[in-house]
């Protein structure tokens, strides 16, 4: 099933076209964004002027055409603060229906918050139970607190960045002080609720927060925005003109006059709520619209792996199934790789989180056969990096893909571009994970599941892997020993295999 979601915001209008496979499993087919800034006129004059209305309808018509070209089953359009507050909203809705053939749903602040939460929650691991979500849009800020799928608190505040830029134009000290005096009392009661909630994590969504994360260098790798770093950045942004912000920080011209006020609002909320960090999150309202539609149409979707509650594992299983890689050999390789990881923990020096990445690399290591058997390990790298893996950072996807890429063939080399682009610490992680995966794959070389268990014996600089086999594992021993080269190189250890018995 394919579905298109259109988010008509105060600052920008977004389109995302997705293929839905199961609740929580989707593949993004297309994206579009237009910075129309509809809220600028609404917040200043109370309505969207005719020329901006024409431009918005043209964008919606184009989005409708893109959606139809993809053959979608449904087009879901929602509008937020700018249209919600516009005096001519009915004119906009009528024109959207007649000219673009779109039934636009104008969301209340509470509805907007609940859908934002659904979008964020849909991509989170179940280990995050109690969370907070801060969505800073152009016209409003939504703060949502939830426990699992249940929303416990929603508050919509008229503190959107475009609204504030219109109300408090310029960057004079008096203007910035007036902005803070305006925002802080509105944020104080919300901050108290965040403090009381005791969230496992607080996430920040939408364009302004993602732009701040980019300027702080944490957008790509899953690290949080720290309050101390945000304070320093916000001070700079609030002292600079939009022209200076564009030149010094490489911020889009349509965001240069709003990112400063946005940084102030987030900084004040974090201070009042006692938050040292928030995690940037790419998912927001449009993902929530899709998640809500998927949950209401679950019976029409393909039932692959919907019983898996962890969205990371669910998306890996989906991709492996889709590429024909989730077979008994992949499961056996993953099982042996994890046994190696656990029993060799005193010497491999990797983090507990790397165990999960090793398992997923093992489940996907033969995905490249979907393209062809020749160089299938290289094909696996491409398919994993381009596949619909949900809830992973880009860094994690690259590590999984490279570990799978090196499960056979040559070990990592300086001439390998994707390898050399990794930070040094991640090259060590990939080498360690691939070293274990190469051995595990070799230990099931015949795809017969002969190795039933293993244990390791560590003696100084030497490691012995003792194997319990069901049958003669001659081929498996030969293959594992051939693929132990990276293990010896990565861990600086000797390695030998012994079969302790067959059944």
Image: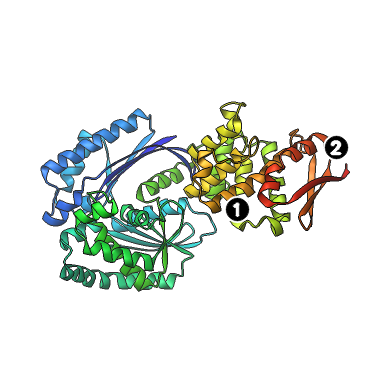
Res. 392 in view: no
Spot occupied by residue 313 in the image (x, y as percentages of width and height): 57, 47
Q: Residue at x 47, y 56 (%)?
A: 149
Q: Callout 2 environment at 10 Å: few (<14), some (14 to 19), or many (20+)?
A: few
Query: Which quarter of the image is occupied by the C terminus?
Result: top right
What residue is shown with label 1?
354
Q: Secondary structure at mark 2?
A: loop
Camera-side mark, 2 or 1:
1
Q: Is residue 457 left or right of residue 308?
A: right
Question: 14 or 414: nearer the eye?
Answer: 414
Q: Is residue 100 above or below residue 129?
A: above
Which of marks 1 and 2 precedes in the sequence? 1
Question: 271 or 26: nearer the eye?
Answer: 271
Spot occupied by residue 358 in the image (x, y as percentages of width and height): 62, 48
Q: Is residue 100 left or right of residue 122?
A: left
Q: Callout 1 environment at 10 Å: few (<14), some (14 to 19), or many (20+)?
A: some
Res. 16 in view: yes
Spot occupied by residue 488 in the image (x, y as percentages of width and height): 71, 47
Give the distance between the C-alpha atoms of the residues marked 2 and 1, in whole angstroms: 32 Å
Q: Residue at x 14, y 51 (%)?
A: 41
What residue is shown with label 2?
471
Q: Residue at x 78, y 58 (%)?
A: 460
Q: Is residue 66 left or right of residue 411?
A: left
Question: 94 or 409: nearer the eye?
Answer: 409
Q: Image quadrant of residue 327?
A: top right
């Amino acid at each position: 099933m394919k579905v298109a979601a259109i988010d008509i915001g105060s600052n920008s209008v977004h389109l995302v076209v997705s293929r839905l496979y199961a609740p929580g499993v989707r593949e993004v087919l297309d994206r579009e964004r237009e910075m129309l800034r509809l809220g600028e006129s609404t917040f200043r004059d109370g309505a969207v002027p005719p020329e901006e209305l024409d431009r918005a309808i043209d964008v919606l018509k184009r989005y409708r055409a893109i959606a139809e070209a993809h053959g979608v089953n449904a087009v879901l359009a929602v509008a937020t603060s700018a249209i919600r507050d516009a005096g001519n909203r009915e004119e906009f809705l009528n024109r959207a229906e007649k000219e673009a053939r779109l039934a636009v749903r104008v969301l209340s602040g509470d509805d907007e918050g609940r859908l934002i939460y659904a979008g964020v929650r849909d991509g989170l691991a179940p280990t995050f139970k109690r969370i907070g979500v801060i969505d800073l849009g152009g016209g409003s800020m939504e703060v949502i607190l939830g426990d699992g799928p249940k929303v416990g608190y929603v508050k919509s505040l008229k503190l959107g960045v475009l609204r504030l830029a219109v109300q408090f134009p310029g960057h004079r000290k008096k203007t910035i002080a007036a902005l803070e005096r305006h925002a802080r009392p509105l944020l104080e009661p919300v901050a108290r609720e965040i403090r009381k909630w005791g969230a496992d994590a607080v996430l920040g969504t939408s364009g302004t927060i993602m732009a701040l994360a980019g300027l702080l260098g944490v957008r790509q790798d899953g690290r949080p925005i720290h309050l101390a770093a945000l304070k320093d950045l916000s001070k700079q942004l609030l002292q600079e003109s939009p022209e200076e912000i564009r030149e010094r920080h490489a911020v889009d011209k349509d965001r240069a006059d709003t990112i400063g006020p946005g940084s102030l609002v987030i900084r004040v909320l974090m201070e009042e709520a006692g938050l040292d960090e928030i995690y940037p999150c790419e998912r927001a309202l449009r993902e929530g619209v899709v998640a809500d539609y998927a949950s209401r149409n679950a019976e029409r979707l393909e039932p692959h792996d919907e019983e898996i509650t962890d969205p990371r594992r669910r998306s890996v299983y989906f991709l492996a199934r889709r590429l024909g890689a989730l077979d008994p050999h992949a499961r056996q390789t993953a099982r042996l790789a994890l046994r190696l990881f656990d029993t060799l923990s005193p010497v491999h020096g990797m983090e507990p989180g790397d165990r999960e990445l090793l398992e997923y690399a093992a489940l996907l290591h033969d995905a490249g056969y979907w393209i062809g058997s020749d160089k299938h390990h290289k094909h696996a790298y491409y398919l994993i990096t381009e596949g619909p893996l949900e809830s992973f950072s880009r860094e994690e996807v690259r590590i999984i893909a490279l570990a799978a890429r090196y499960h056979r063939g040559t070990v990592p080399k300086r001439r390998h571009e994707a390898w050399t682009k990794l930070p040094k610490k991640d090259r060590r992680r990939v080498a360690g994970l691939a070293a274990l995966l190469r051995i595990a794959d070799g230990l099931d070389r015949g795809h017969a599941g002969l190795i039933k268990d293993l244990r390791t014996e560590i003696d100084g600089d030497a490691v012995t892997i003792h194997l319990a086999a069901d049958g003669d594992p001659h081929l498996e021993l030969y293959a594992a020993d051939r693929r132990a080269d990276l293990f010896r190189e990565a861990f600086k250890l000797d390695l030998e295999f012994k079969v302790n018995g067959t059944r």
